Every structure is written in C-alpha cells, then in structure tokens.
Amino acid sequence: MKKAICLTLVILSIASFLTACSFTSNIMNIQKDKAESTPKVEEMMSAMTEKSVSDATSLLHPEANEKADDAIEQIVSYVNGRSVSSMELMSINVSSTTSTSGKMRKEQAVYQVAMDDGEIFYLSTVYVTNNDGDGFISFQLVLGIV
C-alpha cells in the first residue's frame, strides 16, 4: 500500500513539473470599438502616406524582423503619397496569454482601406504587447480576392 501511494505521488509530482503554468483566452470578432490597435494602424498608414519610413519603423515590435525596412519601403512605394479616405475593421481575433514568462496580448485584425483615388485593398495586421514592448510584428497589404 505504501509503495502504491509513493508511486502515485512520484507520478503526480513529475506530471506537475512537466506542465507549464499558462492561461490563454481567445476572443474572436469582438466589438469593433474594442480594438486597441486601431489607432496604431491609423498612425502606421499615416506614416506610410507621408513616406516616413522612420515613423513607420518606430511602430514595429522590438522582435520584428530586421528586414522590415525593405517591406515598409515597398508599402510606401505602393501607397505613393495617396491618402486614406476610409478604413473599416472587418475582423479581429484577440488572444491574451499569462504564463511564467509574462503576459502577452496579440491582436490579429483585417481592415478594408479605401484610398482617396477610390482604390480599395485590405490590411492584415498583428499587434503584440508583451514584456519586450508593443508594436506590429506583421503589417501586410492584401491585394486580390479576400
């Protein structure tokens, strides 16, 4: 009987050591006014229409790819000084994680953007807030069928 209890305790302690403490919650398609990253998306688009690569780069997360300057330059070239006439949040997925390494909030959103010349395209964005800072880890123009 003692051996069975000891063996059970050993198995339970090993199982508890192998599991990490992590709590995750996902919210899909929350109300449009709850998107915390929308002002940052507007600021990023404003920087790109003004051809300010440095302002756009400052909105990136510290973990963002070092080659982001080339990608931002491509978007600036595509926007070509046109201004945004409207921007509508189409969908959003928010996930919040709390673990032993800290808290993280990630907003994945898709916006429909209309330019002043009538052209419409979509933005797919991922905005992360964690211990390292906050900013975009992905900011993509989507052309074609969505």
Image (spheres, helix red, strand yellow):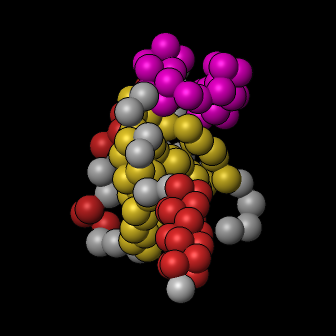
Q: Quadrant of residue 23?
A: bottom left
Instruction: From the viewer's perspective, tell me whether residue 38 is left or right of residue 8.
Output: left
Q: Position of residue 56 (x, y in %)?
A: 48, 24
Q: Quadrant of residue 144?
A: bottom right
Image-based side of 70 in relation to 109, left or right: right
Residue located 38% across and 33% down the image: 131
Q: Is residue 3 above or below residue 69?
A: below
Q: Where's residue 87, x and y in %?
A: 41, 54
Q: Residue furthest left?
A: 33
Q: Which residues are magenta?
A: 52-79
Depth check: 28 or 20 in front? Answer: 20
Question: Can residue 79 be seen from the camera position used here?
Answer: yes
> Which residue is at 31% across, 67% downward?
32
Q: Residue at x 39, y 57 (%)?
A: 96
> Which residue is outermost to the front?
2
Question: Would residue 71 be counted in the magenta stretch?
Answer: yes
123 is higher (above) or lower (below) than 138: below
The kind of secondary structure the magenta stretch mainly shows is helix
Q: Position of residue 115 (x, y in %)?
A: 50, 47
- Quick one: 51 or 110, which is closer to the camera? 110
Q: Nearer the viewer, residue 48 or 10?
A: 10
Is any part of residue 41 visible from this angle? no
Please name the residue shown 43% across and 34% down the image: 135
- Indicate left or right for 119 with 9 as reference: right
Q: Position of residue 11 (x, y in %)?
A: 59, 69
* Above or below for 25 versus 81: below
**Residue positioned most to the right:** 144
Q: Quadrant of the C terminus?
A: bottom right
